């Protein structure tokens, strides 16, 4: 399925897309929907968890505006590109994972800035690509960027970079949507 969000709220079109996927999956055992031209869609796990009601596995991912620098980079190119999966189980609790592909979401940086506190080491870089503890240097649209999940290369941050790139490619290639720095 391919949905065009008409530059509207991602919540609405993503909910509709997942509902339609679940209907189709009940008949064919699998369905995939891609959404383009939409905006922030909220909590990724919400859409994945919709599948639990049907005793199905749900997966939800999205690309977002550039906030994360690739490993060895110094410019935000990737989004925080969340990945969510929900898997039913025989016990009371299903398996649910909802994670960003960055060390932290941008909102956490803003909280530290508002409190006048330094960031924990490894959360972000400045405009020279150096790790910084100054939240003002790691702001959305600012000179620096968030680090990919894992942080510096010595901590295998290229794995988070790879996951973010995978989400970026899947979300843009399957839907024909904007990608990397073209996401607004």
Image (cartoon, rainbow, N blue to C red):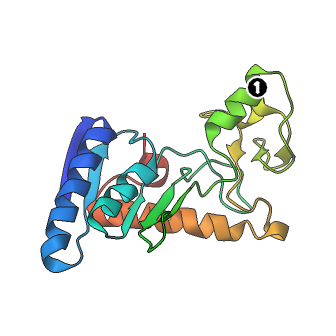
The residue beneath circle 1 is 113
Q: Quadrant of the C terminus?
A: top left
Q: Is residue 172 above or below residue 121?
A: below
Q: Viewer-proximal residue, 86 or 32?
A: 86
Q: Is residue 63 visible?
A: no
Q: Is residue 43 above or below residue 151?
A: above
Q: Which residue lies at the image location 36% right of the left edge and 39% below the top edge?
A: 39
Q: Residue furthest bottom?
A: 29
Q: Viewer-proximal residue, 181 or 47?
A: 47
Number of dots carrying numbers: 1
Q: Is residue 84 visible?
A: yes
Question: Residue 127: horizontal and vertical position, in percent?
Answer: 75, 41
Q: Relative to 17, is 138 on the left or the right?
A: right
Q: Relative to 76, is 156 on the left or the right?
A: right
Q: Which residue lies at the image location 54% right of the left edge and 46% below the top edge?
A: 66
Q: Which residue lies at the image location 42% right of the left edge and 45% below the top edge?
A: 183
Question: Residue 77: horizontal and vertical position, in percent?
Answer: 57, 52
Q: Which residue lies at the image location 26% right of the left edge and 40% below the top edge?
A: 12
Task: Give SS at disc 1.
Answer: helix
The 10 Å Cα crowd at callout 1, few under 14, some 14 to 19, many 20 or more, is: some
Q: Relative to 83, is 38 on the left or the right?
A: left
Question: Residue 48: horizontal and vertical position, in percent?
Answer: 38, 58
Question: Residue 180: horizontal and vertical position, in percent?
Answer: 48, 54
Q: Quadrant of residue 6?
A: top left
Q: Viewer-proximal residue, 44 or 72?
A: 44
Q: Quadrant of the N terminus?
A: bottom left
């Amino acid at each position: 399925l391919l949905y065009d969000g008409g530059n509207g709220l991602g919540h609405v079109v993503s909910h509709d897309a997942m509902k339609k996927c679940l209907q189709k999956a009940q008949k064919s055992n699998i369905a995939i929907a891609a959404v383009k031209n939409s905006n922030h869609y909220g909590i990724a796990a919400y859409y994945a968890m919709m599948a639990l009601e049907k005793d199905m596995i749900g997966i939800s991912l999205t690309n977002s505006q550039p906030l994360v620098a690739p490993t060895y980079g110094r410019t935000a190119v990737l989004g925080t590109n969340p990945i969510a999966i929900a898997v039913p189980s025989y016990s009371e609790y299903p398996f649910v994972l909802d994670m960003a592909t960055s060390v932290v979401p941008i909102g956490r940086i803003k909280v530290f800035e508002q409190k006048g506190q330094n960031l924990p080491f490894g959360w972000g870089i400045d405009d020279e690509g150096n790790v910084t503890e100054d939240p003002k240097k790691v702001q959305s649209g600012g000179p620096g960027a968030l680090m990919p999940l894992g942080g510096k290369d010595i901590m295998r941050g290229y794995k988070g970079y790879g996951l973010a790139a995978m989400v970026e490619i899947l979300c843009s290639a399957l839907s024909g949507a904007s990608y990397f720095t073209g996401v607004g």
